Image: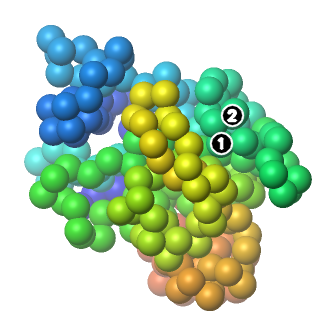
Amino acid sequence: MFLRAASTEEELTKCRRLWYDVYVSEMGRHIDEADHDRKTLSDERDLNGRLLYLSNSDGDVLGTVLVTLSRSISLGYYEDLYQMKNNKDARNFLHPYRTSICTKLILRKDTRGSSAVLRLSGAAYAYGLLHGIRFNFIDCRKFMLRTFQRMGYHIHNPKICHPKYGEAICMVLDLEDNLHLAEMGSHFLRILDYWQGKTEGDFSEEETLLNQLMRC
């Protein structure tokens, strides 16, 4: 699998086709942004966020994740849905300057259960560090809760109602919480240690990705 940042219309279209295949064809969801003629599904932020994807040697898209920096574009309903400004514990999330959201973490059916989710989430995490992000917000279904907790995410709101995808759990990650990442055995800790200069040596994949993203 090859990890890339989408930069062409062709790459974007392939990612949008995967979204359509999963959300519309596989899950049977009725979504306004779906183009049934082209079999693509667009996202309000896919031209303004950073779209990362995995592909095989034939160029087929196997999985995606879309990272949107809060300071770069309006998040629309996500800002209120994720309670990024006003939260029950009055925690200062440094929003919008150091917050982001991750959406469209989607895998092709035959790629699920592989290392793809770790590679995509690691790439999104590295991108966040590169751009000074401290807190990243996501939402997930219950069956993915433990996966994200092991990555280092905390439950922020145990029950939200996404306007397009229904009931979900909102979670937040402190990208710089070394102690919690170590406690959870998160794969993010290796990236953070490298970023903070605590480790050296062979770090080829993440280093290459960071160098690539710096040019985007």
Q: Residues within 10 Å of mark 2 (few under 14, many from 20)?
A: some
The residue furthest top is 37
Asked if residue 197 is positioned above or below residue 155 in the image, the reply reads: below
Residue depicted at 40% across the width and 35% down the height: 165
What's the distance in space between the residues labelled 2 and 1, CA to CA?
6 Å
Is residue 116 placed above or below 85 in the rendered structure? below
- Residue at 48% over, 83% down: 202
Coordinates of residue 79 in the picture (x, y in percent): 69, 34
Q: Which residue is mark 1?
A: 82
Answer with left or right where residue 145 lies relative to residue 177. Answer: left
Where 207 sits versus 28, above or below? Answer: below
At x 20%, y 50%, the residue is 108
The disc placed on residue 22 is none
Question: What amino acid type is highlighted by mark number 1?
Answer: Tyr
Q: Nearer the viewer, residue 172 or 72?
A: 172
Expressed as whole percent of the image width and height from the top left, the position of residue 78 reads 62, 33
Res. 79 mark: 2
Percent across and percent down for residue 136 are 64, 53
The three-letter amino acid code for the residue at tag 2 is: Glu
